[in-house]
């Protein structure tokens, strides 16, 4: 059976090779697969970079403390932010202790 298939492929002239439905299907499959692989690679690269750029709760608390010291936040706003970030900071510290 493989010999018959190989014999059939050898009878197709090179100019007509891409007119054969099976070779067209293989070409489009390979093209779509390559585009999907490229898309996933770019998405992973972007996602990894975005995760590195994100500030943790400790850094955010420091930045908000600086803004508050310069008068950019009221005491009430700073207290609210500090309370929310304290919870996130505690969770992060607990996760670091468990992995250590």
Image (tube, rainbow, N blue to C red):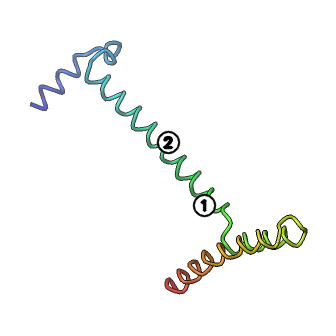
The total number of labels drawn is: 2
Quadrant hosting residue 30: top left
On the image, the x and y values in percent for residue 39 come to: 49, 42
Q: Residues within 10 Å of mark 2 (few under 14, many from 20)?
A: few
Outermost residue, left side: 1
Residue sitting at the far front:
76
Residue for point 13% across, 32% down? 2
If the image is split into quadrants, where does the N terminus sit?
top left
Residue at 83% across / 68% down in the picture? 74
Q: Position of residue 24 (x, y in %)?
A: 32, 22
Is 47 on the left or on the right of 25, as rendered? right
Front label number (2 vs 1): 1
Q: Residue at x 68, y 66 (%)?
A: 55
Task: Give residue 34's position: percent from left, percent from top.
Answer: 43, 38
Q: Earlier in the sequence, mark 2 or mark 1?
A: 2
Q: CA distance from mark 2 to mark 1?
A: 18 Å
- For residue 98, the mark is none
Task: Report helix, strand or loop for mark 1.
Answer: helix
Q: Could you say which quadrant of the image residue 64 lies in?
A: bottom right
Element at label 2: helix
Q: Is residue 43 above or below residue 2?
A: below
Compared to 100, does 31 lie above or below? Answer: above
Residue marked by disc 1: 51
Left/right of residue 71 with respect to residue 14 in the rendered view: right
Q: Residues within 10 Å of mark 1 (few under 14, many from 20)?
A: few
Counting from the top left corner in percent of width and height, residue 46 is at 59, 51
Above or below, 85 against 94 in this view is: above
The residue sitting at 71% across, 70% down in the picture is 81
- Report whether 14 appears left or right of 51: left
Say which residue label 2 marks. 39
Along the viewing direction, whichever of 38 and 89 lies nearer the viewer: 89
């Amino acid at each position: 059976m493989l010999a018959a298939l190989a014999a059939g492929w050898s009878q197709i002239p090179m100019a007509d090779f891409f007119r054969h439905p099976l070779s067209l299907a293989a070409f489009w499959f390979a093209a779509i697969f390559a585009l999907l692989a490229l898309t996933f690679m770019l998405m992973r690269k972007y996602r990894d970079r975005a995760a590195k750029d994100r500030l943790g709760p400790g850094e955010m608390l420091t930045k908000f403390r600086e803004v508050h010291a310069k008068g950019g936040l009221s005491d009430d706003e700073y207290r609210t932010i500090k309370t929310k970030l304290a919870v996130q900071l505690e969770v992060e510290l607990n996760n670091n202790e468990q992995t250590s």
